[in-house]
Image: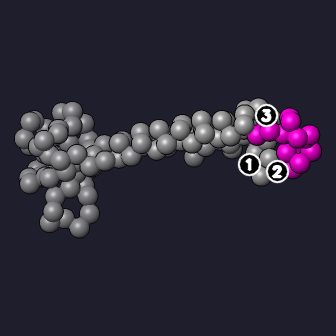
Amino acid sequence: MSEIKCRVCGATPEQSESIYSEQDGGSQHRHLYQCVDFLQDSVISLRAELERVKAENEWHKYPDEKPELYEYVIVWKPIWTRPHVAKLADYSEWKSIIGVDFDDITHWKPLPAAPEEGE
């Protein structure tokens, strides 16, 4: 994630206080409102990104929601102590990554995206 900077003055939150003290009263007020608008826009954008990431990582109740056939996903059933990776081989049969049949799956969620180079 990139560092947040004011789109008006380029200041980071840490620099803002010193910039405001160097400006005269009228400019300071106008500039302050522009910076506040920028920060509000940033908060809205970050909240939307957070909601998108949350939605991508939610557990889906099976069989109410089903993943694409043959797509590996993370699966869960109540008697397990950890999740496993499996795919829906037909509309009711789960296969583990090594071909073992799973039954009584109650929830699934997509695998996370692969890391980008350099992460």
Q: Is 19 or 106 nearer to us in this picture?
A: 19
Q: CA distance from mark 3 to mark 2?
A: 15 Å
Q: Which residue is mark 2?
A: 17
Helix, strand or loop at mark 1: helix
Q: Is 106 or 33 nearer to us in this picture?
A: 33
Colour mapping: one colour
Residue for point 16% across, 58% down: 77
Residue 101, x across and y down, in percent:
11, 50
Q: Is 57 or 68 nearer to us in this picture?
A: 57
Instruction: Note whether residue 86 is visible.
Output: no
Q: Is residue 42 left or right of residue 30?
A: left
Residue for point 59% across, 35% down: 41
Q: Residue furthest front?
A: 26
Q: Which residue is mark 3?
A: 30
Helix, strand or loop at mark 2: helix
User: What type is the residue that disc 2 sits on?
Assistant: Glu
Quadrant in which residue 29 is drawn: top right
Residue for point 9% across, 36% down: 91
Magenta part of the protein: which range?
18-32
* Proximity of marks 3 and 2: CB atoms separated by less than 8 Å: no
